Image (tube, rainbow, N blue to C red):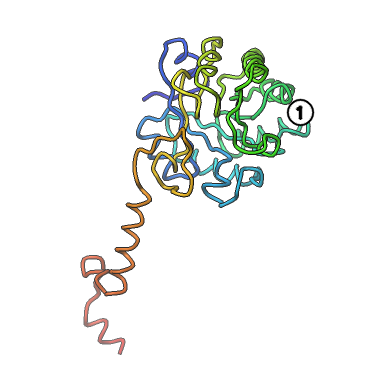
Amino acid sequence: MSKVTAMTFIERKKNHEKITVLTAYDYSMAKLLDENGVDCLLVGDSLGMTMLGYEDTLAVTMDDMIHHTKAVKRGVKNALVVADMPFLSYHISDEGAVINAGRFIKEAGAHAVKLEGGYQVKSKIEAIIAAQIPVMGHLGLTPQSVNMFGGFKVQGKTEQQARKLIDEAKMLEEIGCFAIVLECVPEKLARLVSEQLSIPTIGIGAGAGCDGQVLVIQDLLGMNKDFVPKFVKTYADLSSVIGSAVKAYCEEVKTGAFPEEKHTFKIDDEIINKLY
């Protein structure tokens, strides 16, 4: 597999080749995903829920994101590493947006950043791109706006909302985004948006008409049984596998079955006898 770049995304769109994206938050998982051909690893601010136990993404800080992005980057050889810009890291000013985006590139080694929103963050995206930092857009359900939306709800269901989403997608393409995540958007609308853009759309809960797909890795692997969104397909049941392994370990430690002799190291009895 050759190195994936932001330009690779554009080429895949032209060649009608689907793009695979998964979230990653640590070195070992990033290494596994990269070795198995995932095109892009998104260090999502979803780490607030998956790794830090928050109720949503709003409490995630720049330092949280930098820490996890560094770890992911160390495990990657080929995949494009995209870092989510967390809540209030780009909203206050264009200058602040560029400084924080630059931290992801300089400190963490990310290849690109992702921002949520359309017209309201236009100048921020333009400033970041002007600083030669690739930007992935994000429209539809934007989790950082959960309080404005009144919850995690499908977006673009009315004519007004749908037209705005199309207009904002075209605007993001025009100002230089190399791709756009479409989250929780009706399938037919997402397909229409995808057909009208020359940059790829990456869907999550937006149907097969998008140019690529993204899932949270814990959802894909069945590691979170508390809540599984409708748009998730679970490809493994690691929750049960891990649970069984941990229970077996605890039982063997308590009964003395682990560790066995093959798990231990030896020393000459003569040396031990001298220690008494």
Q: Determine whether, in the image, residue 119 is placed left or right of residue 195.
A: right
Number of other residues with Cα within 10 Å of mark 1, as a class: few under 14, some 14 to 19, many 20 or more: some
Check disc 1 and give the amino acid type. Asp
In the foreground, 88 or 106: 88
Query: Residue at the spot x=55%, y=29% of the render?
Result: 184
Picture quarter containing residue 182?
top right
Badge 1 element = helix
Q: Quadrant of the N terminus?
A: top left
Tell me the residue that label 1 is attached to. 94
Query: Residue at the spot x=21%, y=81% of the render?
Result: 269
Numbered-mark total: 1
Q: Residue furthest front?
A: 158
Question: x and y percent of residue 71 in the render?
Answer: 51, 44
Picture quarter containing residue 142?
top right
Q: Determine whether, in the image, residue 65 is placed left or right of residue 206.
A: right
* 120, above or below 92, in the image: above
Picture quarter containing residue 255?
bottom left
Question: x and y percent of residue 177 in the render?
Answer: 61, 19
